[in-house]
Amino acid sequence: MNEQNIRGLIEEVREGKLARRDFMTKMVSLGLAAPLAGHLLLNAGIAQAQTPSAYKATKRGGGGALKVLWWQGATLLNPHFATGTKDQDGSRVFYEPLASWDKDGNLTANLAAEIPSATNGGLSKDGKTVIWKLKRGVTWHDGKPFTSADVVFNWEYASDPATSAVTIGSYKEMKVEAVDSHTVKITFNKVTPFWATPFVGVQGMIIPKHLFEAYKGAKSREAPNNLKPVGTGPYKFTDFTPGDMVRGAINTTYHQANKPFFDTFEMKGGGDAVSAARAVLQTGEYDFAWNLQVEDEILVKLEVGGKGKVVVIPSGDIEFIQCNFTDPNVEVDGERSSIKTKHPVLTDPAVRQALSLLIDRASVQQFIYGRAGVATANFVNNPPRLRSTANKPEFNVDKAIAVLEAAGWKKGSDGTREKGGKKLKFVYQTSVNQPRQKTQAIVKQACQKAGIDVELKAVTGAVFFSSDEGNPDTYTKLYADLQMYTTTMNAPDAEIFMNQFCSWEFATKANKWQGRNSTRWSNPEYDKAFRAAEGELDPVKRAALYIKMNDMVVQDHAVIPVVSRPRARGANLKLRFSESGWDSDFWALQDWYREA
Amino acid sequence: MTLSGTYVLRRVLIALPSLLGISLVLFTVLALAPGDPFGDIVSNPNIPAEVAANLRKKFGMDDPVMVRYFRWLLAMLQGDWGFSFASRINVDTLILQRLPTTLLVVGSSQILALLIALPVGVYAATRPYSLFDQIANTLTFVGFSLPTFFTGLMLILVFSIQLDWLPFVYRADIASTGWHFYWDHLKQTIMPVTVLALFQAASWTRYVRSAALDVVKLDYVTTARSKGLKESVVVLKHVVRNAMIPVVTLVALQVPAIFGGAIVTEQIFRVPGIGSLLISAILANDTPVIMAVTFVFSCLVISFNLLADILYAWLDPRIALS
């Protein structure tokens, strides 16, 4: 898929020959995040097909209580300090960004009057400035008006390193100024093709200037409103117990007519995923449950209760296997898997191809993940055609054996293949997690048939995902041959996702293994394409570059995807809400209602 | 009465170094344990590495363990419990928010357990090997063989799912007012309290029974009976009073353990108590909170030990504490 092809498709959308959603599906199957794909259409001047709000209630309030369960409760309610989704979700009840991402990756206005585009003059030709027009008549929960000063303040607040805001990444390298009381201009230091990061989505929630002004910088942690949010959202803050309960009451001056539907809001934390599923699906005690990481078999049983159903929301998260391109068994200058070494076996493309053929993704989906893990061809087989559905993930032991034989890997006396004294023996590590251990077992079995000896290793999640320099078992060190975990692609732009294959991102001792490239795979062509994409203003050319990069990684089998991980939520049968895999669960909380 | 002020003072003074030692061990173990409170931030590619580095500096986490320990100790002596990394608020606020719920649930379960254990134990002891004694014995064995997580799930299955009588998600702040408030509170407290109380009552019944059984056979009880005292007076005034001495000690010693046992129960019923705070802090690697909660637990153990000793001397003047 090159630039011309993408342009052709965009034209087809413009002429109405190709459905917008089909275009998105194709782009996503090529490795682009949905928001990035939506961006292509937006920049081509094809107006957003704003998701029509399915809100049917005709008056504000009267809906009683909305009760949701988060088995990890929100621990803080300042969106600029929110690290996990639990905190982002808790904050999102009260705070709103200028715009949010819907499930198709389209921008939907919250506090903005309209989405900036080239046609409405919001986007400059040089790709450096964005002008947001703010919605008028919006008030904070305490009655003060919402203006451009608030938006500018959020940039000042988050971009100040002394504040230690986790949102700083979205607000660095730019200047934000107020043009008038309801217009804000963002000027980026460099050409920024993907401009919808600041003030958008979970990183973009806006806090009121008048309450946080005195607590910018080092004093940020003393702000009393860190625990008592005053926002613009559909529900006003009532009370909060960290890790346990977030409560809100209807905002009777909410800026969208007839919304919200519910009189009170309650977000209960704690417990475990199974009992959360039970409280929604089986007993109906709660209306909605977050992140049901439960075996599908159990969920199906609970659904029989007839009170609720499981909602599966597609997202960009992928469970995948990384191949180590360096030697984990040789120590150079005090580090194993040093970039000065080469993996004796995995650097052979035939071995990686065989491994990819030995992953029985269909069984992994069917017997382990169920609805919560879809065997993925995408990101693997690199669909030469546009339709990703035509590409089934391939599991073929015979073909794998043929590939290995052709490459000269012959069976040794112990049944393990070898070549030139090097054996096909791998250490395959992942975090302790039941589905992962089951997947490991399936892979090991298939590998044994093909004459590959796999030693399984499981590391506690707290260690595996930590940044502990002293611990040899962290995933960034990759002191093993293969490892498996889920990488999240929910950042709306591909740049951050794709930098994990750049040569300057190698995780090494020198950078305390903070580099993102832990496979230590590299390709000068890839590096070049990445640099080109960074400065590429034409979104179509940029998308084509990302697709090309994706192809390079995938065709080389540097990583082997296993299943994509949609988000699983539980919801009462009567609850109506719109989900999105690219934003907080509460991105459209104002539209939630209950059918009679 | 041999219990003197100096004795109590000396015991308190001995308790202090133990607490200090415990805090040192806890702090070192937590510092050496794997896991990183800012792991989420470090592994999130959207957040620049400087943020985590900055936070580490702000919370003084780059200093050597001993420096951090003494800083913690100094702050603690001044009444500053530390600052939660996860919630970015003071730890004492967090603990105080959770304490009433734990006290309510654990306290009422203790009282319920005593209300069951005392009469059943004493009655069984006055009629040893009778049918009542046999049944009580069997039930207590069943009671303390079943772990709380099991009985908790069983109760949920029966009363919440099959019968749909009781809610299984505990809410500390109930919105309803007036009588409804108490009714809702009662309904949601029944299951967690029962689970904890049954477990505790089972073991206490056995202690009460054996303590009472020891006393029942003594000569002075026979004397009391032969004086023609009423059976109830014999049991209450002569048997129970003396049998209670070891039991009171035991109850006092087990109070801290109950807080530990409540961790599991709190998790099952989503009771927002100290136990669930500890669990979520451990999951988030929020060391100041883990440190504070475990330290509270150790303080409880030490002070209840002390209390048990003092009670013992007060109840049984024959014991000389010097």
Image (tube, helix red, strand yellow):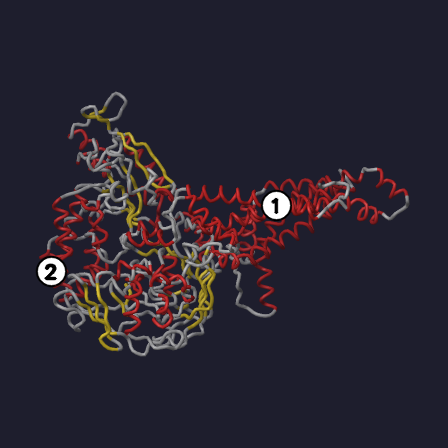
Counting from the top left corner in percent of width and height, residue A319 is at 29, 46
* Residue A525 in the figure: left or right of residue A461: left
| SS at mark 1 in the image | helix
- Label 2 crowd (10 A; few <14 / some 14-19 / many >=20): some
Residue type for callout 2: Arg
Residue situated furthest top in the rendering: A413
Residue situated furthest front in the rendering: B6
Labels 2 & 1 near each other (Cβ < 8 A): no
Residue situated furthest right in the rendering: B227
| SS at mark 2 in the image | helix
Residue at x 12%, y 44% (from the top left corner): A524
Subunit ID for the residue under disc 2: A
Gap between marks 2 and 1 measured at Cα: 81 Å
On the image, numbered disc 1 is attached to which residue? B13
| Residue A399 appears in the rendering | no
Residue type for callout 1: Leu
* Residue B229 in the figure: left or right of residue B188: right
Subunit ID for the residue under disc 1: B
Q: Is disc 1 on the same chain as disc 2?
A: no
**Would you identify the image quadrant in which residue A507 lies?**
top left
**Would you identify the image quadrant in which residue A196 lies?**
bottom left
- Label 1 crowd (10 A; few <14 / some 14-19 / many >=20): few
**Would you identify the image quadrant in which residue A434 lies?**
top left
Mark 2 or 1: in front is 1
* Residue A134 in the figure: left or right of residue A572: left
On the image, numbered disc 2 is attached to which residue? A7
Residue in the foreground of this view, choosing between A513 and A459: A513
Residue in the foreground of this view, choosing between A234 and A262: A234
Counting from the top left corner in percent of width and height, residue A189 is at 18, 62
Counting from the top left corner in percent of width and height, residue A79 is at 35, 62
Counting from the top left corner in percent of width and height, residue A385 is at 15, 50
